[in-house]
Image (cartoon, coloured by chain):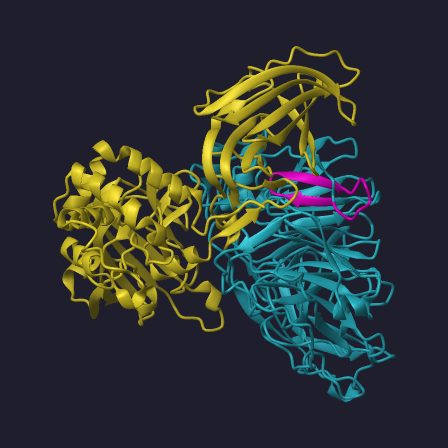
Amino acid sequence: MRKSRKTWGGLCCASFLILSACSQNSPQDKTSAQATGENYTIAELNLGEASYKTHCVSCHGQNLEGAAGVNLADSEWLYGDTIANISHNISSGFPDSGMPGFAELLSDDEMSSVAKFIRSKRQGWDYVDYKIYPVAEGSAPDFSIVNSSKPVVSGRFKNGLADFERIEVPNFIVVLEGPLSVPWPEPTALLFEEAGWTNANQKTELQIEINDEPVVPVDPSGWDWVIPLERGSQTLKIAYFVSGPIKADEPWTMWHKSSARAYIIRSEGYPKLAPLSRRAKIEMEDSLIEVEIGELPQVVRIKTIELPAYSVNVGLTNNMSYAFNTRSCDIVGLWEGDFLNIGPNVIGRGKGAGQPMGDWAFHHPDVLSVTHDTDRDCRFKKYTRGESPAFYFTKDGTDFRISGHAQDTGVKFEVGVKGGSTEPSVNMALPDIENYSVTKTDASHTTSDNYTIVQTILIEKL
Amino acid sequence: MSMLTQRSIPKRLWWKTILCVIPLYPATSFAQAAGTYAPDGYSIQTIAAPEGATFEVAGLAACDNNRVYAAIRMGDIWALDNSTPQAALTDPKWTKFADGLDEPAGLSCAEDGSLLVAQKPELTRLVDTDGDGIADEYINIADGWEFHDNYHEYHFGPAQDSDGNLYGTLNLSHDKPGSFTLGAMGSTGGYRGWAYRVSPDGTFYPFASGLRSPAGIGASPDGEIFYTDNQGDWVGTSKLHLLESGKFYGHPVSLRDHPDYSVEKIKAMSPEELSQIAEVPAVWFPHVEVSNSPGNPEWDQTGGLFGPFEGQIFIGDQTQSNVFRVMLEKVDGQYQGAVMNFIGGFQSGNIRTSFDSHGHLWVGQTTAGWAAEGPKPFGLQRVVWDGETNPFEVENISVSPTGFDITFTEALDPNIITKSSVTAQDWHYDYSSNYGSPKQDLRDLRLTDISLSPDRKSVTVKLNLTEGKVVMIDVSQLKSTSGRSPSVGKIYYTLNRIPK
């Protein structure tokens, strides 16, 4: 039985590792310092990270996501979010809550470095200032009143989560603004769900500025707005207009307070990285549904991060997983670790992508192919389940069969051709794989369904 | 087989499945589809889901092997022993037949005992080769379209015609960057917004275009294929069409894959030009009053086991949590007909319906991330007739050159038959990129005559008819000889043609 992590999955872990590896010269560290108005040095961050891994990681998690200890990456700081506050809390601890003080273990510099490291990993809004302006029912979107009138309600969401359910008027403009931290090295974006909800009754309109510059979504006509974000710190301002006649007998035609959800997402595959609104946080907390491996391999066909459409994921019993693509008939990914979190693909409308819960050996566009020319047409025929799932396809007029088998710390792929046909010159194209050995062996045994295995490829973790 | 674990339990998804029978009471006519109402003698029964399963049923098939198969969005297919209806209710025996599918949204039983499933990237045949009740082979039947990993690119079906061809429908995308949109939904090509046919030899054929969110497809007893579409851009209100080769059903972005069109050419076309090439539906389903998000059409072929509605079509609605029925007839060789609410008050959004061999109508349910009148996010229920009680309802309706003949399931009280005891309206819908259409040119119609048949089971109403309208006739005030009122009184007839 493979164990599973009690986290949002391998993605966060992978992000953390990549971020750590990049932290030697990361521009993000400088911008984080700008966000908080406090100065960090690379040396401090390295020292802080090392101390964190020694003393903190077991309770607060590799990604600072929290476990026995609280989440340190979000914006909910119960006891202050300054370096001084955090350093003090590290020093004194919270004995009533089970957190010891570290004053006897760490120097002041070390505690300050840990505080700075933690602070540099902040995700999302530090806080959000909000202003609410009522508008006339059924009025056309007009944001000029923001400059010409005073808000009827204003305040600050100190936890960095915009709460649309605080808005008590039915027709309004709400302006949300605050410093935003984007620590991830990979491309990210702002996702505002239900931004463009418009019908005969209700109109909505969104204006977004980053560092006081207006920005436009990837697809302005969509209901969900996606806007690329820069890594580091920035000021995010959202002005959101909602107005329309209230139709009590048609509640589904109206914008609903719980409909608007804002997130930071990864640009590739749209997995959600951090919530920016209260409802978004609730949705994210619900989003882990892990497919575990029992005594038999699992086969799961689902939209998956880093993999092209039409990929079929196979989780083997030895902590290795791979993906076969029914369009190219290639092996398009191989990873070590737990199998899949399919939560983002099935929670709600399932707009997100499934997440491999481990570390890639390789993934698309690197592929393991039965020919050098991956553009050649193939016709996927079927796959079988059981102890050794196998994929069957026709390529270049030949019937092929490919299966992956758990073997020690790796996967042995067997490639077969249909018995009776002229044996082709099977030439497996292999991707470059770091930290794995690749052994290609010719073979000639026959399967029970009359395929001749002509070659095996063993990919093992070094 | 697989074990799905939820580390963080979605509170809104977890509801304890409660084995129960919901009592339903006859009610007065409802202006809306929502609410609890049922014909006399009919009830809704709730079937307990497999323990721990997030049972979002998006595909449903009651097969001749006395098994009910349910495909859930998460990718599993479950089989329920339905050989004894009472046991299926009180002690349901579920086994997992398949798993790992990509959001399956349609199921069908094949004659060879295999199961056909519409998953997003593929139409797949599932075969249990060793007879242990678990699928061993997942065979590609058709994948001749493009799936771009967009959540809204659903795949529905299959339905089979009398020649053994299989049909499926392919949803348009939503919020897909780079897609071609003229409203809310889009296509990045590859036959999105099309229906397809795959022949018994496996040949894929793009069959018809102009579909938007065609969440239901089914075959009539004569082997004709019908489909439903959801209200939205270019669909003024939800509707039912006969599906025919080469025809265009209204949503223009799908035409980008048609050899006679291009994106530029489509953009240059006015709604008037598009409407001239678009098919009119056999039946419009008025928004809110009947349906917002219809599922598959399911014909009552139970031979009377489901009561007096043999041959009619039963369809569930995902938003209204109801089941409504459709009565078709042909005028000048073209289908048209009426829709009426049938039973309301289900626990969740109804997306799938399937009659079993016992004459029970199974209803698969998921809100799929949208809103439903029913309070629960998913589930499985069935509608059962007690086999004895004759309900008092509209049995059928037929158009005449001067009005309508409306038949009831029981003789009517003649004292209530007056011209003012039946009211009527008509209207039509706008065809545009707007998200749905309000009723256009709504007007009251006055009956010029009403008469009762000698057996008192039918009334003939005369009124001024106009082609191209939906005519609503409200018979709520009529009563049976035993003093009963119909549970549903509003009939919505799509009057494409007036017979000569």
Instruction: Give the colour of chain A.
Output: yellow
One can see residue B432 in this view: no
Closer to us: B21 or A68: A68
Q: Is residue B190 above or below residue B81?
A: above
Residue drawn at the location 80% of the way across and 68% of the way down: B87
Q: Is residue A82 above or below residue A268?
A: below
- x and y, in percent, of residue A278 in the image: 35, 61
Q: Please identify the quarter of the rendering in which residue B378 is found.
A: bottom right
Of all chains in the rendering, the one displayed in cyan is B
- x and y, in percent, of residue B451 in the image: 78, 78
Closer to us: B425 or A69: A69
- x and y, in percent, of residue B210 in the image: 59, 43
Task: Report the magenta residues as a range.
Answer: B116-134
- x and y, in percent, of residue B77 in the image: 68, 51
Q: Is residue B373 above or below residue A384?
A: below
Q: Left or right: where does residue A414 sit relative to residue B109?
A: left
Closer to us: B276 or A7: A7
